[in-house]
Amino acid sequence: MVVSVFNRVVVVIISMLVLAGAVITLLVATEVSTPEVLPYGLFESQLQRVADATGGSAAAIIAVCAIIALGMIALLFVEVIPIRKPALLLISSTEQGIATIDKDSVRVLAEKTAAALHYVRDIRCSIGQRTGGLLISCRASVALGTNIPEASAELQNKIKEAVEQFTGLRVLEVDVKAKYEKVEAKRLAVR
């Protein structure tokens, strides 16, 4: 955690320095400022070459500085915005500590449990939480000829059992919307 914060601070500082350099160079190239803009004559000779550039060279310098400045602004934006933390579900809270599970992990568990059934071709689940337990909603594509009411009931039971067994969380409801897999129309052979 400390290394991550240190790395982000270093990236922000370097990005700000590069952004400042790009903006100063852009100001000199567009003749808004003079090459003596920096104190103590820092980079004055380099900025003088930028100020002396004409035609295509000046346009290239302006374009590169604008691209670099926009890139650094984007990088600063990404680094400064707090990272979205994954949604966690509380498994238990005791004197020894707190146990949580990522909501996405529960979704993966539900999908893998369902995909293990031979008639399931594809499944996508989402996890919701209510007071007292979880709500799991799934959209399943099943093999043509599968008895959908039986398949839906089996999917509901298997998903509920797996989630409750492996996470210890109570499942209030498993909603399954099933449809038959799309079967490509085959061309009839005409003789």
Image (cartoon, rainbow, N blue to C red):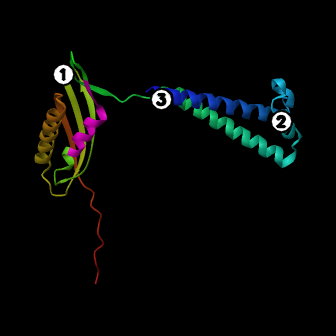
Dominant secondary structure, magenta: helix
Q: Amino acid at mark 1?
A: Gly
Work out whether 59 lies above or below 98: below
Q: Check residue 3 in the rendering and tell me which mark sits there, or answer none.
A: 3
- The residue at which mark 2 appears reads as 47
Work out whether 142 lies above or below 16: below
**Residue drawn at 23 percent across, 40 percent down:** 109
Are the two marked residues, 2 and 1, in contact with CB atoms closer than 8 angstroms? no
Count how many numbered circles sit on residues in the image.
3
**Residue drawn at 65 percent across, 36 percent down:** 70
Separation of residues labelled 1 and 3 (CA atoms): 39 Å
Indicate which disc, 2 or 1, sits on the residue closer to the N terminus: 2
Where is residue 90, by image quadrant? top left
Q: Amino acid at mark 3?
A: Val
Indicate which disc, 3 or 2, sits on the residue closer to the N terminus: 3
Q: Which residues are magenta?
A: 99-112
Indicate which disc, 1 or 3, sits on the residue closer to the N terminus: 3
Q: Secondary structure at mark 1?
A: loop
The magenta stretch spans residue 18: no
Q: Nearer the viewer, residue 112 or 135?
A: 112
- The residue at which mark 1 appears reads as 132
Residue 188: give x, y in percent of width and height. Answer: 28, 74
Work out whether 86 lies above or below 177: above
Residue 89 appears in the figure: yes
Residue 16: give x, y in percent of width and height. Answer: 65, 29
Q: Secondary structure at mark 3?
A: helix
Are the two marked residues, 3 and 2, in contact with CB atoms closer than 8 angstroms? no
The magenta stretch spans residue 107: yes
Q: Nearer the viewer, residue 139 or 52?
A: 52
Horizontally, residue 159 falls left or right of residue 185, namely left
- From the image, state whether disc 2 or disc 1 is nearer to you: 2
